[in-house]
Image (cartoon, coloured by chain):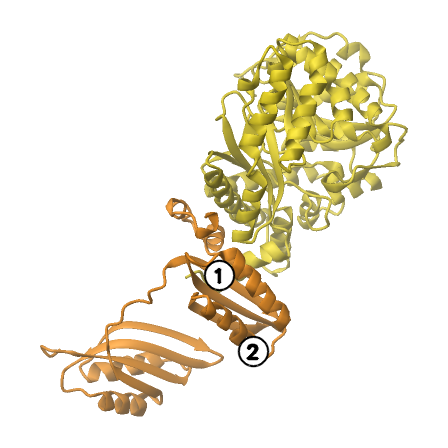
Amino acid sequence: MADRPTRYTISVLARDHVGIIADVAKTLFDLGGNIEAVSQTTVQGWFTMIMCAAFPETVSTGSIQDAVEAECGCRVLVAPHEELAAPAVSGEPFVVTVVGDDKPGIVRGLAACFASRGVNIEDVWNEVRDGRFIVIFHLTVPASVDPKELRYELEHAAADLGVAVRLQHQDIFTATNSLNVHTLQRRPLSSETS
Amino acid sequence: MIPTEDILKTLEMIQIENLDVRAVTLGINLFGCADNDSGKMLRKIRSRIHGAAGDLVACCDEVSAKYGIPIVNKRLAVSPVAALLEAHDAKVCLPVAGALDEAARDVGIDIIGGYTALVQKGSSDGDTRLIESIPEVLAQTERVCSSVNVASTKAGINMDAVCLMGRQIKRTAELTAAKDGFGAAKLAVFANIPEDNPFMAGAYLGAGEPGTVVNIGVSGPGVIKAALERLIESGNDVDLGHVAEEIKLTSFRVTRVGELMGREVASRLGVAFGVVDLSLAPTPRVGDSVGEILEAMGLDAIGAPGSTAAIALLNDAVKKGGLFASSSVGGLSGAFIPVSEDQALSKAVEKGTLSLEKLEAMTSVCSVGLDMIVVPGDTDPETIAGIIADEMAIGVVNQKTAAVRVIPAPGKKVGDRAVFGGLFGEGAVIDVRNTGCSARFVNLGGRIPAPLHSLNN
């Protein structure tokens, strides 16, 4: 590693197959890169991965992109890395689940509802299972938003979309699935109390 | 981030399998309301209940909405009312019960327990007045529930009280004959009554408890039944060890819900959190039945040989899973088999597969006793006392809580139905064999001594 490494954010998209991470990691290693953070997922047979990696000063965005695309058969996007502060949304973690018949506009309608109230989507998962369309949003609901009002608004939007929606504090899922519950109880109560 | 599969699993428990919190019960100590002036005492009782429980329903609704889990019942349990009657004559009993009834109504509560006397070793003046007043109180109030502890492992069985309760159950049913004897459904006779039980009709606040405290009764028969059905249909080689393990895991999840929500209700009310009661409490709804769990375990008829072993397995596994989930466990904590409140048990009685004797055997290995059983209206009080004495013996000797809540439905015979409605359900009248043969024994009275605590073979 050079004395003054340059960091890049690298996004990879490919058809999922065994060995893809090995191929990408080897290519980056051969360029002198060091992977510092990575997150990966697959959706309906498509693989995607986002990484932060450090390289010698001489390695450019173009050389990384060319090498990975050539060696691994992926589509790659490379950008100089910037240290970004985490989103400034603080609040209580809630989970919204949506179940119903699949049709265009469900995610759009609910996401617009969150955005208009400053509710941050931390993660979203969406799949059709047994003919049912299911979406799960992990949210941070700011203290200024009354969960009761948000629930009312979501239910209103869901009724228009013809789906069932539930807004539940994340702790209920932690309580029913995790061995650790007592640490949660030391947290201050949500804004719903006030 | 909670894994997607965990979220979907929890949702299924709530939406399809009837997972809920069965009871949030606020215990309220009323000893400070004692006063020689009965008018002042009644005012103090109302004021104490209004002050302690005024926000209970709204608070439960908020917590329920936050977590998306229903809280089915919000209830009150007060310290034994017999203590308030010591310095008064019998005329004050009904007004005191009326004050409890009205105060509960004022705060939006449908049932209030604690019209209670503890007489396992003998009765004080207040205890005697309270027990004498039970039939009128239960007939003339709507929300008041009564319980009398007549036995304990340390004291033995107070047979004078057992005989008296046989008569009072009969009288209570007669005074509420228009409702199939419903008054008796609000009256339970206990051995080893717990001080922190959140479930009715036996909920009261013990003397060793905090002044105001939230106790939680969890539920989940439907969740356990669904888990067992999935396990058995999985195609894997399933034995009863796997069944017990699945029940433990499910009980863990159910208990966690109660603990989380109970602590939050207590915190919002600014009162102590007491216990999670691990009981599996059925309701008359299909899919919310302890009897259906026995069927899922492979019993083609509830009451068939194997039923006692099956309920023992269920009871034990529920406790083991729940105990790992919460360090604040108490109350009755076991699988209930209240016949009229459980549609599968009720059907089994109707079909004749489940007898009173088999129910008694099952109560020796589960919670809580002979519960919500409709007996013929012409059952004599001494036979009812004999039923109570037998169940008390099971509790006393096995060092467990045991209770009797039987309803001698006036005018009803074996095969007829009694209908109570709501969570109390309905049920066929069960056959009581050998009636009229217990009077000489129970009328001997006195106290059956406490059992040995050694030589346990």
Judged from this view, the residue extending furthest toward the left is A3
State the image quarter where residue A60 is shown: bottom left
Amino acid type of disc 2? Gly
Instruction: Evaluate if marks 1 and 2 touch, with contact meaning CB atoms under 8 Å apart.
Output: no
Q: CA distance from mark 1 to mark 2?
A: 20 Å
Horizontal relation, residue A107 to residue A61: left or right: right
Question: Which disc is residue A105 wearing?
Answer: 2
Q: Is residue B159 visible?
A: no
Horizontal relation, residue A56 to residue B457: left or right: left
Q: Are marks 1 and 2 on the same chain?
A: yes
Horizontal relation, residue A64 to residue A161: left or right: left
Question: Which disc is residue A42 wearing?
Answer: none
Q: State the orange chain.
A: A
Above/below status of A76 relative to B354: below
In the picture of the structure, the residue carrying the numbered disc 1 is A95
Above/below status of B176 relative to B337: above
Which of these two is toward me, B392 or A93? A93
Residue drawn where x is 53% and y is 59% of the image: A149
Q: State the yellow chain.
A: B
Q: Position of residue B99 (x, y in %)?
A: 66, 24
Which of these two is toward me, B345 or B244? B345
Which of these two is toward me, B350 or B7? B7
State the image quarter where residue B336 is shown: top right
Mark 2, other Cα within 10 Å: few <14 / some 14–19 / many ≥20: few
Q: Position of residue B7 (x, y in %)?
A: 51, 60
Q: Position of residue B359 (x, y in %)?
A: 73, 33
Horizontal relation, residue A100 to residue B299: left or right: left
Q: Position of residue B335 (x, y in %)?
A: 62, 38
Q: Secondary structure at mark 1?
A: strand
